[in-house]
């Protein structure tokens, strides 16, 4: 049983209480209305105790183990009825809920020291290659974290900068020079670059 310790009137956003760290709430009413889950009554109230937040419906009950759209924003609740935040796994992949409890339906989010991308078409964490605003990024196949530095993809080596974007052209790294083609792939062997021939060893170094 959830014990009442504090009450938050429906008109006050949870972000005003818990804040949002490292990410903006990009949830939209339109996206949330299309999401799976029931619609909450307009006169419900948010409540809090030492374990977290939950949402009390007009009849005194509260949602458990389900999603719910409240004031146009999608939330999810655990088996005890507490609002969940952070990563939540479902059959199709990983969702992300902001500190406010609102579901992130698309875009970048920083969690710890790593960046992740939520695919707007699925609202789930993306992996592998993604194109965002005409820039390619590589997201770790297992963790989804944005890759920086060297990464082997399908037998070819690429170098991703600190912002996640792939480098092209000449690259100086660790005191050595490498050349990355227009796709960002590292060249090896003889290469004709800028009207001159260069030899790049098996590790790509000139």
Image: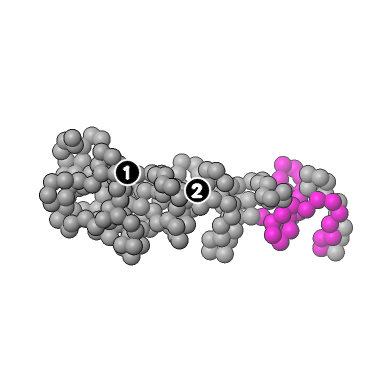
Q: CA distance from mark 2 to mark 1?
A: 20 Å
Q: Which quarter shows the N terminus? A: top left
For the question of whether residue 46 can be seen, the reply is: yes
At x 52%, y 47%, the residue is 144
The x and y percentages for residue 91 are 43, 47
Residue at numbered disc 1: 84
Closer to us: 185 or 154: 154
Closer to us: 184 or 45: 45
For the question of whether residue 18 can be seen, the reply is: no
Residues drawn in magenta: 167-194
The image quadrant that residue 194 belongs to is bottom right
Compared across the picture, whether 194 is left or right of 160 comes to right
The x and y percentages for residue 39 are 24, 57
Look at the picture and state if 49 lies above or below 150: above
Q: Is residue 24 magenta?
A: no
**Secondary structure found at label 1:** loop
Closer to us: 72 or 37: 37
């Amino acid at each position: 049983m959830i014990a009442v310790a504090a009450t938050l009137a429906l008109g006050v956003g949870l972000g005003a209480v818990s804040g949002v760290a490292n990410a903006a709430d990009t949830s939209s009413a339109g996206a949330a209305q299309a999401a799976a889950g029931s619609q909450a009554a307009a006169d419900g109230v948010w409540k809090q105790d030492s374990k977290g937040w939950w949402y009390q419906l007009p009849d005194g009950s509260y949602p458990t183990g389900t999603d719910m759209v409240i004031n146009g924003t999608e939330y999810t609740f655990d088996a005890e009825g507490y609002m969940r935040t952070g990563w939540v796994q479902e059959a199709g992949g990983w969702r992300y809920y902001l500190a406010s409890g609102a579901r992130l339906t698309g875009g970048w989010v920083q969690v710890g020291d790593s960046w992740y991308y939520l695919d707007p078409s699925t609202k789930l964490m993306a992996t592998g290659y993604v194109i965002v605003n005409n820039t390619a990024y590589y997201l770790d196949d297992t963790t989804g974290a944005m890759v920086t530095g060297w990464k082997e993809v399908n037998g070819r080596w690429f170098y991703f900068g600190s912002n996640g974007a792939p480098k092209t052209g000449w690259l100086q790294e660790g005191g050595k020079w490498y050349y990355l083609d227009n796709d960002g792939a590292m060249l090896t062997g003889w290469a004709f670059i800028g009207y001159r021939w260069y030899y790049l060893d098996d590790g790509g170094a000139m």
